[in-house]
Amino acid sequence: MDLFESLDNTPKNLLPQDGMVQYYGVILPVHESDQYFEKLLHTIEWRHDEAIIMGKKIITKRKVAWYGDDAFSYTYSNITKTALIWTEALLNLKKIVEETSGERYNSCLLNLYHDGNEGMAWHSDAEKDLKKQGTIASLSFGAERKFAFKHKQSKQTISHLLQHGSLLIMKGTTQTHWLHRLPPTKTIDQPRINLTFRMIEKKG
């Protein structure tokens, strides 16, 4: 028997059924993660996120930014955003994530949570502009936060702690069958930056 035959470095699926979520853990050295966190915090064109819910415009404390290969238009929560062109730091991170995950991405939605009071409600990333059953790569910097999943039918919930400099991949039918969220917490007073690399389907 080959000594290395049983070794498999591919992360296990965190979901019991109906999707694929893989947590690669920390993929960057701490000093690099620290440097990227500071660079993203101060060079990204952050804006407060907006959403239209039941006809009312909501402006969040959380800030977002949208970057991509082209000036993609991307609509979610009834608000359309236009992508900015990649920064050098984002291109470097995109390359690292693509090499690690074996997938390709043409855009990135970034989120800035100033502290644990800011989070994200239950939702699935199934907007019409996204590649159907495409892969979404979530790269985290800053404060460690719990990330949760809930099955749409059974209501089963699963959570995982996302570390500074770590990568989580969602793919397959995950968005069809599962919701996910970033729960708020009063125990964290440090900021977190999350990059979600994804594939936008070009129209025409």
Image (cartoon, rainbow, N blue to C red):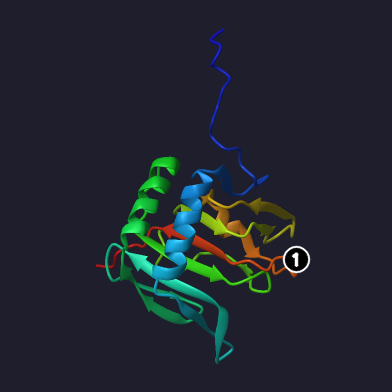
Residue 143, how many percent across, how many down? Answer: 62, 60
- Dividing the picture into quadrants, the one containing residue 186 is bottom right
User: What residue does disc 1 label?
Assistant: 187
Instruction: Say which residue appears at 61% left-offset and 49% top-offset.
Output: 18
Locate the N terminus by quadrant.
top right
Q: Amino acid at mark 1?
A: Thr
Which residue occupies the foreground of this view, 114 or 76? Answer: 114
Q: Is residue 70 left or right of residue 19?
A: left
- The answer to whether residue 170 is above or below residue 80 is above
Residue 39, how many percent across, how many down? Answer: 42, 62
Describe the element under mark 1 as helix, strand or loop: loop
Number of other residues with Cα within 10 Å of mark 1, as a class: few under 14, some 14 to 19, many 20 or more: few
Instruction: Say which residue appears at 35% left-offset and 48% top-offset.
Output: 95
Query: Farthest residue in the top direction?
Result: 1
Instruction: Say which residue appears at 59% left-offset and 67% top-offset.
Output: 191
Locate the C terminus by quadrant.
bottom left
Query: Farthest residue in the left direction?
Result: 204
- The answer to whether residue 74 is above or below residue 125 is below
Residue 186 appears anywhere in the view: yes
Which residue occupies the foreground of this view, 41 or 163? Answer: 41
Residue 69, how many percent across, how many down? Answer: 28, 62
Residue 181, how many percent across, how many down? Answer: 64, 64
Q: Is residue 117 left or right of residue 92?
A: right
Residue 133 appears anywhere in the view: no
- Dividing the picture into quadrants, the one containing residue 105 is bottom left
Q: Is residue 156 left or right of residue 113?
A: right
Instruction: Say which residue appears at 57% left-offset and 59% top-offset.
Output: 142
